[in-house]
Amino acid sequence: MSIRSEFATFAGKSSYWFLHTFMNGGSSLPGKITTAIDPAILKHLGQNYDIIVVTGTNGKTLTTALTVQVLKQKYPNVVTNPSGSNMEQGLVTTFLKAKNPKTNRPLAVLEVDEANVIKLTKYVKPIAFVFTNIFRDQMDRYGEIYTTYNKIIDGVKLAPEATIIANGDAPIFNSVDLPNPKIYYGFKNHDDKDNFKAEPNTDGVLCPVCQNILHYHYISYANLGNYFCEHCGFKRPELTHELTKLGALTPNSSDFTVDGQDLSIGIGGIYNIYNALAAYSVGRFLDVDPKDIAKAFTANERVFGRQELIDIDGKETTLVLVKNPVGLNQVIDTISKEKDDFSLICLLNANYADGIDTSWIWDGEFERFTKMPIKKFITGGERYKDITFRFKVAGVDENIHEVQPNLEKVVEEIPTLPTQKVYILATYTAMLQLRKDFAEKGYIKGGME
Amino acid sequence: MTKEYTLHIAHLYGDLMNTYGDLGNILVLKYYGKKMGINVESQVVSLDEDFKSDDYDIAVFGGGQDFEQSIVSKDFQTKKDEIKKFIDSDGCLLAICGGYQLLGKYYIDAEGNKIPGIGVLDHYTEQQHDNRFIGDIKIKNKETGEVYHGFENHQGVTYTGNGERPLGDVEQGYGNNGTDQAEGAIFKNVYCTYFHGPILARNNIIAKHILIKALKRRYPNDDFSAQEKIDVSESY
Ligand SMILES: [Zn+2]
């Protein structure tokens, strides 16, 4: 270890200790101090770990959390980073905070932002990369899906021996020839008889080899599924880990079978099943027994924290964050599994954290709500005009649709809604405002987590 | 409104040029169509598929990612003659962003490649370096006095040419190129724009204009005064 790294680590650790002790915090500031002294610090900090990098646009956080749960079944020391601390400095901080390992080579499961993969692989060589998916997120971030994937690939090229554990149902993960060993996971709960194309407003449906439009035998959602090209023979790779059966699916639970093992997770949504499939595949890669993986999935319900159930004067209120069309459509699909009558509230803001362009709501399948047992609709948020018109065009019955731009009034109205169950979809800053109001009224303790 | 009218929309490359909720334009045309007693049908016309001018009343052409647009640029050349025929015969065409660019002579993509359009309109699109026009935009149509709201998000800078007049003069935002105060282009019944939002969701009046024009073209002997009275209150 160089004296520079030694000093950088000391400075970083001290600042973490200082912040932790006196400021009751310490997320990425120690990382900032350390990397300012020695940018190569990751090499020194990460060299003793077997690192698994989890990246992709959606699902990183839950995949990382589930993977940690799975690996803990067999390995005592697993380091991980808190959700959101997925850039270079957050990674440095994660290693700084880690206790001195008891075992020789502890594992580190790291959620890494797509553009930050290369900042890590410049200094350390992970044993595996997990690719969840690539969807267009808020348009002004990295832009196109191909640009995003290329950023990941730039980082992967520095670690050609690491195993790639990728979503086999995503055509983009089969578009660049890489020397790395590969493991693919995906859905095999169908035969190959059907032949159709994705819905018109689906991203990423061009064959990467011949640029014709891909066909599918099966689509799980968006452009994910059993794809093939009629022109050049490009097709989904052989799957290493196959989901062979979808069992009972509700908004709060999913049963499914992978490689003959029955699995269950305490959260709804096909996208979450993919996250579990990814965690399962990492577990198998590191020899965790399938039965232990099943156990790990049900061990700690808190990892599924996103969809939160809040008691609003007796109303079972589920609060869901929405931020892009693919995520939104998955939320709509998950809610469609609700069998009881419910009320639906949709709050749209367009601040920077929400995405400043609201066009994306037009790629949301709001039409599906008209076929669900919904007794009352409320639209609101700072951009209530946009979301209200979207609901009108979707065909929502005007007689049960209320427009309520005032957020406090929305909250006051929840206890008077005609149903026991209430679903609230909100963009990020609308969610923050709502939670603040919930906290003031004593429905929740406060904060974002 | 006892008679049932039907209008056909060609959703040009709807499976590839669909970047910012542009599908919403078709949903809005169907929504107001229903209020006007029009059955609005839409069909995607994509790679290797024929676009026949006579089959359609309205064409909608959205924007895409650079990769998709470069593929569409090649295929679009094969549809040039029929698109020209459609425009010359007063077909209504709404072209957004990349669709707008591809109707013109050429555009330069983010990597500096010159991608040919089909040149049925006289505009062309250059590239600005390390800058993108992003944000809310407001324009005024000089001819009608109508004010339109949208969201622009483009790196290309477009310069209009012969026979084209702007969709509106910029009151807030950047518009075609940030210098000449023009946004979009109108040529016969072709509306070109950089507006997302989508444009017809924010500016219902344009959806109404398109539907009325398409009706009059398809059913030249009928009276549409009832349809023209339909209220299109602004959603913005
Ligand atoms: Zn192909």
Image (cartoon, coloured by chain):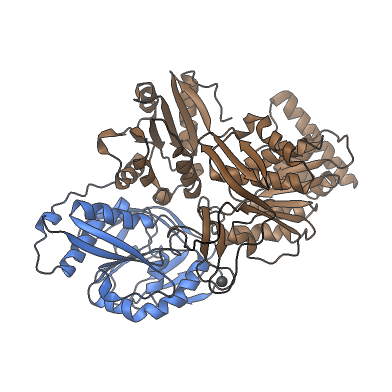
Residue A263, picture quadrant: top right
Q: Nearer the viewer, residue A48 or B56?
A: B56
Q: Position of residue A329 (x, y in %)?
A: 46, 46
Q: Position of residue B38 (x, y in %)?
A: 20, 57
Q: Nearer the viewer, residue A125 or B51?
A: B51
Residue A376, picture quadrant: top left
Chain identifier matching the brown colour in the rendered picture: A
Q: Residue at x 78, y 49 (%)?
A: A39
Q: Nearer the viewer, residue A192 or B1?
A: A192
What color is chain B drawn in? blue
Q: Can residue A48 be seen from the camera position used here?
A: yes
Q: Is residue B21 left or right of residue A12?
A: left
Q: Position of residue B65 (x, y in %)?
A: 49, 63
Q: Residue at x 23, y 62 (%)?
A: B210
Q: Is residue A332 left or right of residue A91?
A: left
Q: Nearer the viewer, residue A310 or A167?
A: A167
Residue A332, picture quadrant: top left
> Height in image: A97 above or below B76?
above
Q: Position of residue A294 (x, y in %)?
A: 69, 37
Q: Quadrant of ligand 1?
A: bottom right
Q: Is residue A208 left or right of residue A310?
A: right
Q: Can residue A87 be seen from the camera position used here?
A: no
Q: How many numbered markers are drawn?
A: 0
For the N terminus of chain B, the quadrant is bottom left
